[in-house]
Image: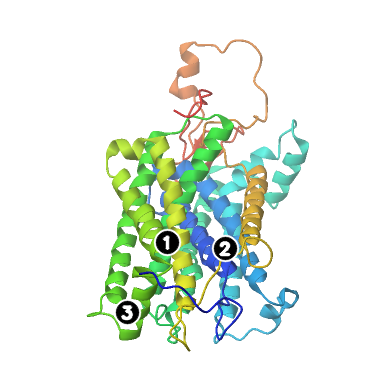
Amino acid sequence: MPLSPTNYYGSGLEQGYWGLMIVTYPYISGLVAGSFVVATLSQLFGRKRLAPLAPVAAILSFALLLAAPLTIWGDARQPSRVYELITRMHVPWSPMALFLLIWISYVVLMLVELYAVFRADNAARAEWAERPVRAKIAGLLTLGARSRDRRSLRRDERIVRWTAGIGILIAFLFHGYIGFIFGSMKSRALWSSPMMPVIFIVSAIVSGIALVQVAYFGIAKWNGWKIDREIVSELNMWLIGALLFDFYLDMIELLMSGVRAYAPEETYEWFSRLYFHGPLFWTYFLFQLALGVVVPLVALATRRGRASIVNSGVMAVLVLMGVYMMRWNVVAGGQMASKVTNDIVSYPLVWTGYDSVQTVLGVFGVAFLLFLLFAWIFPWKAGFEGTTEPAVTPPAAGPVPTTPATTSPANQPTPVPSTSLMGVLEDGSAPGLLGATRKRDHSGIQ
């Protein structure tokens, strides 16, 4: 039978100090790392089909990166003294000091990458006469480098490749160190595991892929664009691979913690009381494992399931929910195992006020507003649904001539090299990411 907790949060001999803000922090940092990995699939690994999603994934990762420290700030009992994280660093003994150094490095690297990715397109935008405000902003973002020749594009490409490669390492550090913090706490039986950093990193990649999928669907629906089923299918293939690895690690962790023959006695006792027979049974076996991993794996196993927009959207949402439940089970479970009594420490869900659902929604709201701001600033649409940005010189009125001369290869614009990221030509037109153009479809999502 499930055990009834007799020691309550905020009273008795023990209480859980890490609440929803600390549950949400590793979740958001995982989304940062995972979405950044999606952004690099076309840049480092040659997945050209996913190239249109790279700018959106990078913007999404940067918005979440800026919002991530808000969870730590919200958890602080004295948030007015947050500046002391900088003025009183205890490197390398303090994990939080290391976090701050990694976070600052990540922000600087993302700024450099976003500059290189969008520089040529911002140079084209700077010449707009129809939208002077956005043209002024675009001109400032180029930092004075407005050349759009092949040499400049090649230079941007090299910068992006270097920042993407370094960024993956920093992304793994940024999220893996959280798993290291939990795994290094030998005083907590359910946290003390060398597999924690790997489990956190893999689940971060899973959640990042799912988030980019949801963002793709939302953007296409909002703008009335047709969704490319080949992009959806390939993104689902990467999601399946990450889910299989995640499921493998979950089963290893279950074996090493939930089977008496392989687990330390204290670990097994608390795992059994909390997950097999206790308050975390449903959040672990139903939401984290069944709905968050097994159901998406089964639903996306067939080619038809991977190409289905509705099925893919639902499965992406389930994956995001399952990863959040994993964070909840880790943070809550480790604190519910009492250190001084045989009771289960209660870990209540607070809806309003300090460290509550209300504050979590506020952090996600800030991240969403930052994403909207960056989506307005950066020219990410080129190649996403076809060229929709206003051209530097409006085309002349009248029907487009259909003479053979207009379709002759000799009269076509010089294509952008396949290694460029944001294809902006010398005449200011944008053929799309990696030169792939798609016509706009107003029929909505199919």
**Tag 1 secondary structure:** helix
Determine crowd level at label 3: few under 14, some 14-19, many 20+ residues with C-alpha closer than 10 A.
many
Q: In the rendered structure, are the residues bearing label 2 and label 3 in contact, judged by CB atoms less than 8 Å apart?
A: no
Q: CA distance from mark 1 to mark 2?
A: 36 Å
Q: Give the image location of residue 385, x and y in percent.
A: 52, 33
- Asked if residue 421 can be seen in this view, the reply is no
Give the residue number, with chain letter if any, for mark 3. Answer: 268
Q: Mark 2 vs mark 3: which is more N-terminal?
A: 2
Residue in front for this viewpoint, 366 or 257: 257
Q: In the rendered structure, are the residues bearing label 1 and label 3 in contact, judged by CB atoms less than 8 Å apart?
A: no
**Tag 2 secondary structure:** helix
Image quadrant where residue 194 sits: bottom left
Q: Give the image location of residue 155, x and y in percent.
A: 53, 52
**Can you say which quadrant of the picture contains the C terminus?**
top left
For the residue marked with disc 3, what is the amino acid? Tyr
Query: In the figure, is residue 64 to the left or right of 198?
Result: right
Q: CA distance from mark 1 to mark 3?
A: 18 Å
Q: CA distance from mark 2 to mark 3?
A: 43 Å
Name the residue: 50% across, 41% down.
216
Name the residue: 66% across, 61% down.
352
Q: Mark 1 vs mark 2: which is more N-terminal?
A: 2
Give the residue number, with chain letter if any, for mark 1. Answer: 283
Give the residue number, with chain letter if any, for mark 2. Answer: 109
Q: Mark 1 vs mark 3: which is more N-terminal?
A: 3
- Asked if residue 206 can be seen in this view, the reply is yes
**Tag 3 secondary structure:** helix
Residue in front for this viewpoint, 79 or 208: 79
Q: Give the image location of residue 415, x and y in percent.
A: 48, 34
Q: Give the image location of residue 220, x and y in percent.
A: 53, 35
Image position of 255 with respect to 428: above or below? below
How is the model colour-coded? rainbow
